[in-house]
Image: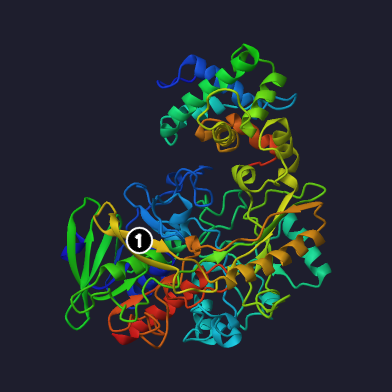
Amino acid sequence: MSANKTYDAIVIGAGGGGGVVAAVLAEGGMRVLILERGREKTFAEIPRDHLRNHRLSLYGQNFGPDDNAGNPRVTVDGQGRERTVLPYEGGYQNNAMGVGGGTRVYGGQAWRFLPTDFKMASTYGVPEGSSLADWPITYDDLAPYYERAEWEIGVSADSELMAQHWPRQKGYPMPAVPLNSQGRLFRSSARQLGWDVFPVPLLVNSVPYQGRPACIQCQHCVGFACPVEGKNGSQNTMLPRALATGRCHLETEAMVTHIDTDGSGKVTGVTYFDGNGEQHVIKTGVVVCAAGAIETARLLLHSASAQQPNGLGNQGDQVGRHLQGHYYPGVMGLMPEPVWDGIGPGVNTATVRWSHGNEDEHGQVIGGGLLADEFVLLPMMFWLRHLPPDVPRWGAANKQFMRENYRRFVEIKGPTQDIPSPDARVTLATSVKDKWGMPVAQLSGTTHPETVRTAKFMWERAGEWIKASGAVKTWGQPPGLGLSGGQHQAGTCRMGHDPNTSVVDAHGRVHGHENLFVADGSVHVTNGGFNPVLTLMALAFRTAEGVLKQR
Amino acid sequence: MQPENIALTEAHWRTLQALADRIIPQDPDWPSGWQAGVGDYLAHQFERDLRHQVEPYRRGLEALDDEARARTGKPFAELGNAAQDGILVAVERGDVFTNWPDAPAFFAMAIQHVNEGFYSDPNNGGNKASVAWHMIGYIVKG
């Protein structure tokens, strides 16, 4: 029984950040306990259910939370109306809960943020009402850790074509995943436009790597588990490394409800419920929160003490604020002939030409993002969310459209950099509790309206690209103002030097708590115009190294 | 073959089948929604995720039959395709004669659920032998 042992460190959450931290600490000689609220699941236990997965969760999801009713959240809309939502509902901003976290079922886009992404405020200024800020570290500070993540977890990408955007010491460990027919189409049209493009970097094996096989190019990548372990996540890279040391124990179905501190703010341990519902208090020297931007913020807020009545690290009222994800402007279209060859993962060809330095008719646009083509599309998603508005929703005409156009359909979209707002936030719900009796996360506010403007600019670029590709019909609208988070959730324990405007320092340590760290997307000051997982993994390497050095 | 569910009578199922087969009609090459297994999908879902929608379905299917009788003197399932489509166009617009809770909302709900059965994975009960996926060209290889 883990509770009877002593551990040098406890890692809360076995996802993308937690796996890295556990491996680095255990390999560095520390005795580590990982507490993961979800379960470990085999491929067969993560079904290819087209109505219940992490791409389309109409009635549920295939990788956690497993008990929907026991894990609600509360959303608050612009009029202050509260609503209790379940994990498969949009407002919940679910990622995943289980061993591997989101990395078990992600698409695995392996983006470094660009150097400018770490300097957003000094590059663009801070729009009124926004909490846009620079990171306390630079791209160069993080670059060696990006490299570790790329090599130790495993990324396939084109070192040569990407070098002009991201200065790097060393190439990628594997060549890029081959382009499918849609990827080749968009590569050729982008080059006609004079846009520089390259294959999307992926945490997917293009060749056998670290004892696991190459991707088999299946049609169920993002939102599902890999049938051959050719997709690299915590569960098949860093967590096995951590466990192989013999110094790391992974306890699943273990829900941490409180981080315990003494009068000086030093962390003494955690309180958690095991899978049988039994409560334990366990002592430790170091706690690393890696539960995701929503759950980590919730846990810090709920760990209030007499000395820290507003929650740990929250003296500046920053914990839970600046919640970010990404807006996804996209344009859909039909090609004159079928272009679908079904070769997965499907997201192939990307450009970062519009990541920065953009101008619309009003002047400078803040940030931008990447644009790329799309993963192999589930038929149900095509019917539900991707048909042109003028196609009848029923009858022979609808069936005929589906039949004739699934293989002609293309889409260009990408994550637009969120311009953060302090009002987009996680707080503790006042009346709704989870099955352990802990107040659930309450989500309120929206990103800053500048995000809408940037997203519209990116939507126009997506339209240019898809039209230049020969699409005979295009449709889709730019996104409106809202709260983002979801699988790209970030920002709620932002990194900075000043405890009044940030939660953790430049090494992921929570201000005022010498032995408490955060290693997930929470610490991102801004979230780049990219899928954030490689950045949070790189930061986890850096934070874990700092924990080891401090011993 | 008739899916069984305690809350819906045989008459409800007949109307539902006729409705599903106008939402996704048979054509010379490919089966209708019901032929592809949408009925099995719905029967399964009425005991699972759609258990709270059984009552709205019961009321909606009865209203659809009332609407058909008011217009033609026959229940919906006994009409020809063109007559059924004509009624559904009116229902979609909310242009109804009889007493409906919300005609367009009921129809929109049925459209979505029928298509879920048709286009989702066969383990959900519909899309038998992946027939809908073959129709559109989504082929699962790995």
Q: Check the picture and name the quadrant holding the N terminus of chain A.
A: bottom left
Measured along the vertical axis of the image, is residue A239 above or below residue A44? below
- In this view, which residue lies farthest toward the top? B73
Rendered image coloring scheme: rainbow
Q: Position of residue A533 (x, y in %)?
A: 50, 68
**Can you see residue A247?**
no
Measured along the vertical axis of the image, is residue A72 above or below residue B113? below
Name the amino acid, label 1: Ala
Residue A323 picture quarter:
bottom left
Residue on which the image places disc 1: A441
Q: Does residue B77 appear to the left or right of A548 in the view shown?
A: right
Using a 10 Å C-alpha cutoff, classify the residue at mark 1 as few (fewer than 14 neighbours), some (14 to 19) or many (20 or more): many
- The residue at 60%/73% (across/down) is A172
The chain that hosts pointer 1 is A
Q: Check the picture and name the quadrant holding the C terminus of chain A.
A: bottom left
**Count of all numbered marks drawn on residues in the image:** 1
Nearest to the observer: residue A199 or residue A477: A477
Q: Position of residue A39 (x, y in %)?
A: 35, 53
Q: Does residue B15 appear to the left or right of A318 in the view shown?
A: right
**Can you see residue A129?**
yes
Q: Does residue A26 appear to the left or right of A51 in the view shown?
A: left
Q: Position of residue B53 (x, y in %)?
A: 45, 32
- The residue at 83%/68% (across/down) is A192
Measured along the vertical axis of the image, is residue A357 above or below residue A476? below
- The residue at 63%/24% (across/down) is B21
Q: Position of residue A406 (x, y in %)?
A: 71, 44
Q: Secondary structure at mark 1?
A: strand
Nearest to the observer: residue A47 or residue A434: A434
Nearest to the observer: residue A35 or residue B78: B78
